[in-house]
Image (cartoon, coloured by chain):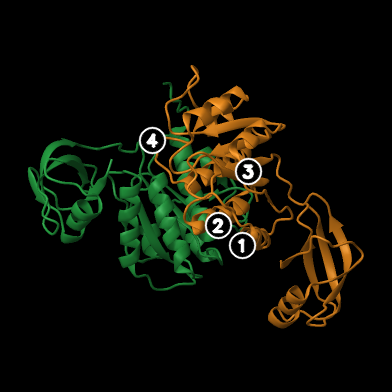
Chain colours: A orange, B green
């Protein structure tokens, strides 16, 4: 299956962008009558037939549409401080998209190594990863957000802060994969290399966040962020057996 | 803690290589009497004191040694086909080391995109990741191994093959994170982008391998390999709570 991305697609007729048209007609050698799939990144998967294979304005007609294509039973948002090395953060964007994430919030925290964030490349990576892993949902890449705003913004679902300091709350830290339950929506905060400050951890707890650990290993920021994404996936895929 | 790697260290006296000496004395500005930690990558962590801060031949004396430093309660080996894009495989080597893996077998399978493997860069990445994540165990990077040899070599522990085709065995595929139990040693085979061939899957099953799925998402080869590593980590960290 070849997946194209068209956020503005509206049945029953659509003309691909010049770049997608070229890819479709010149690279993939698709022609009139051939079928291809298009997603709007909002969960809709359209099966389309090419009516005009113009390499600059390839036009298709929508044959059928599937809503909420492979919708995940949970919504996970990860707020993570961009890494000093941009490639590491971009790698996280790709992997999180493959494994499954609803949103990513580049987090500006006290010890952040990178205090600016340019979304252009990140957006491209999200689109490429969504198409490559054949998903109809495109993760939302939020703008760079300050720590206070991130913890004070109301959210449906559980809210967690992963940090390396000793637990501030008497109950200690739970292991994310143990405490998260199938179907639960969640926001997970992942700090910079220098970890969250004591004040940030206290503020998060005051806002109702739960302290968590991601395990006994020392993980880089982007690895910790992906670990959170994979744990949510494991929790929701558990008891998942393919019989065929 | 600053960790150095010296596979040949033998108490009670050791002279760092020229490169490590320079890093130690010139970059970190460590001098006579300062302490540093050295691992042999075999589980030994040596606490050392600098006796001669020569920037080319820095010599230390071993003050104390800790055996089996943070030894994992399980041994996981991942056999995975090197990706066409070498960086993706190298990325896996780094992340698997951080999360925890005992060995990596570059796998040569029927649909492999890359049929040669040069270990030099990979070995450097394993060392850097071990030092960066403060581990005393260095994963073993095996030579490029043919599929038949990989599945016919006897191994203590459970053996799994992850593939995307319908299950060959009547029992279907189990989800790795469900079937793997804490403390179990395991070998997991991860195929190339084109997946394992039917013949390879049948051969593995004939050799006693269990068919597994890594979940419902379509993962790239290196992402699937890391997912297996993270699942083993989750299984072994489960019920892991930090109270302090």
Marks 3, 2 in one chain: yes
- Of tags 4 and 3, the one toward the viewer is 3
- Of tags 2 and 4, the one toward the viewer is 2
Q: CA distance from mark 3 to mark 2?
A: 17 Å
- Of tags 1 and 3, the one toward the viewer is 3
Q: Horizontal and vertical percent for residue B167?
A: 60, 53
Under tag 4, what secondary structure? loop
- Which numbered disc flags the more N-terminal residue, 1 or 3? 1
Q: Which mark is residue A121?
A: 1
Q: CA distance from mark 1 to mark 3?
A: 18 Å
The subunit carrying tag 1 is A
- Which numbered disc flags the more N-terminal residue, 1 or 2? 2
Could you tell me which residue is drawn at 59 percent across and 53 percent down? A117
* Label 2: how many Cα within 10 Å (few below 14, some 14–19, many 20+): many
* Label 3: how many Cα within 10 Å (few below 14, some 14–19, many 20+): some
Could you tell me which residue is drawn at 74 percent across and 55 percent down? A136
Q: CA distance from mark 1 to mark 2?
A: 8 Å
| Contact, mark 2 vs mark 4 (Cβ under 8 Å) | no
- Numbered disc total: 4
Which residue corresponds to mark 4?
B183
Could you tell me which residue is drawn at 30 percent across and 38 percent down? B71
Looking at this rendering, what residue extends furthest in the right direction? A12
| Contact, mark 1 vs mark 3 (Cβ under 8 Å) | no
Which residue corresponds to mark 2?
A90
Q: Which mark is residue A145?
A: 3
| Contact, mark 1 vs mark 2 (Cβ under 8 Å) | yes
* Label 1: how many Cα within 10 Å (few below 14, some 14–19, many 20+): few
Which of the pair A48/A219 is nearer the observer? A219
């Amino acid at each position: 299956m070849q997946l194209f991305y068209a956020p503005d697609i509206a049945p029953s007729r659509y003309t691909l962008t010049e770049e997608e048209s070229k890819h479709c007609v010149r690279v993939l050698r698709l022609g009139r009558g051939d079928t291809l799939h298009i997603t709007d990144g909002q969960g809709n998967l359209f099966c389309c037939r090419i009516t005009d294979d113009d390499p600059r304005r390839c036009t298709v007609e929508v044959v059928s549409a599937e809503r909420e294509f492979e919708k995940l039973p949970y919504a996970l948002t990860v707020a993570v401080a961009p890494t000093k090395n941009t490639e590491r953060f971009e790698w996280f964007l790709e992997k999180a998209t493959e494994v499954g994430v609803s949103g990513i919030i580049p987090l500006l925290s006290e010890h952040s190594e990178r205090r600016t964030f340019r979304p252009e490349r990140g957006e491209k990576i999200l689109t490429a990863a969504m198409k490559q892993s054949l998903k109809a949902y495109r993760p939302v890449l939020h703008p760079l957000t300050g720590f206070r705003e991130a913890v004070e913004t109301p959210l449906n679902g559980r809210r967690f802060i992963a940090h390396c300091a000793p637990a501030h709350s008497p109950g200690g830290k739970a292991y994310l994969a143990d405490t998260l339950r199938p179907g639960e929506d969640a926001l997970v905060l992942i700090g910079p290399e220098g970890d969250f400050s004591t004040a940030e951890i206290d503020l998060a707890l005051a806002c109702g966040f739960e302290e968590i650990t991601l395990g006994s290993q020392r993980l880089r920021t982007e690895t910790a962020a992906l670990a959170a994404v994979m744990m949510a996936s494991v929790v929701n895929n558990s008891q998942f057996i393919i019989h065929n």
